[in-house]
Amino acid sequence: MRTAIVDDVIDVESLLAEVERDSNGATVLFMGTVRDQNNGRPVTGIEYACYGPMAARELSSICTETAERFATLDIVVEHRVGHLAVGEASVAIAVAHARRGSAYEASRYIIEQIKRRLPIWKREEYTDGTREWVDPTAVAVVGPES
Amino acid sequence: MTVTALLFASYADVLQRESIEIALPNGATVRDVVAHVRAMPGGDILPPSPLVAVNQEYARPDAVLASGDEIAIIPPVAGG
């Protein structure tokens, strides 16, 4: 089991290699990537900021909980911070387990806990040169005309 | 006693600083730190009960503080 907050490109192949074990029958890889629009606004990139020491600690706690809940230690998670371009991975979660059901559920549990608890923020950059911190608790206003 | 409040992202931008030293009476709580920051210019960007961590662990508004504590006032998180 390993977790890290990183400021460079995530090497997905190395994450997969780390969770490899002969007793595992399923490996799930989840990647979160920067998409080119949000709520109808064209996005050119995202800057991720974090409360470093707490983010590292909280990510480690999430994975310890996941290991206990789903009975596998073959979990590697990296979350990237800094400036990311469209298409780049902000987070990668590799989980391997004897059974696919638990591998899927553990992966889903980790990303949902990250969304809820990890002290990380993102500032989207738009094609018109403006940028804004994203507030996931704000209600998205996307009408039929936007 | 003195504690340090940490600000991030939109909160740091609006209040134009990333940390604030705050002098408080003994027995002060997380709620007192939030009230202090909310009373500053731009402080109304904080909701009345924002997410707060004390020394890197999420804490309740009535958590009692000790001198030297680091109180992070956490905007809505957006990881992933």
Image (cartoon, helix red, strand yellow):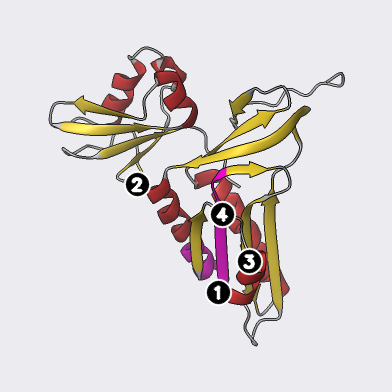
Q: Which residue is mark 1?
A: A71
Residue bounds of the magenta highlight: A62-82
Q: Residue A30 in the image: x percent, y percent?
A: 68, 59
Report the label total: 4
- The residue indicated by pointer 2 is B56
* Residue A77 part of the magenta segment: yes
Q: Is residue A43 above or below residue A11?
A: above
Measure how far apart labels 2 and 1 are at the Cα level. 27 Å
Closer to the chain start, of discs 1 and 4, is 4
> What residue is shown with label 4?
A8
Q: Label 4 sits on what residue type?
A: Asp
In-front residue for pair A41/B43: A41
Q: Are marks 2 and 1 in one subunit?
A: no
Q: Residues within 10 Å of mark 2 (few under 14, many from 20)?
A: many
Q: For the residue carrying disc 3, how many other residues have a C-alpha within 10 Å: few (<14), some (14-19), or many (20+)?
A: many
Name the residue furthest bottom.
A22
Q: Are marks 3 and 4 in contact (CB under 8 Å)?
A: no
Q: Residue A138 placed where, x, y %? A: 62, 26
Name the residue beneath numbered marker 3. A94
The circle drawn on residue B33 is none
Q: Quadrant of the C terminus of chain A?
A: top right
Q: Residue at x 36, y 30 (%)?
A: B18
Image point (78%, 24%), residue name: A142
Q: Nearer the viewer, residue A121 or A27?
A: A121
Determine the chain carrying the residue at label 4: A
Which quarter of the picture shows residue A127? top right
Decide: is A128 above or below A111: above
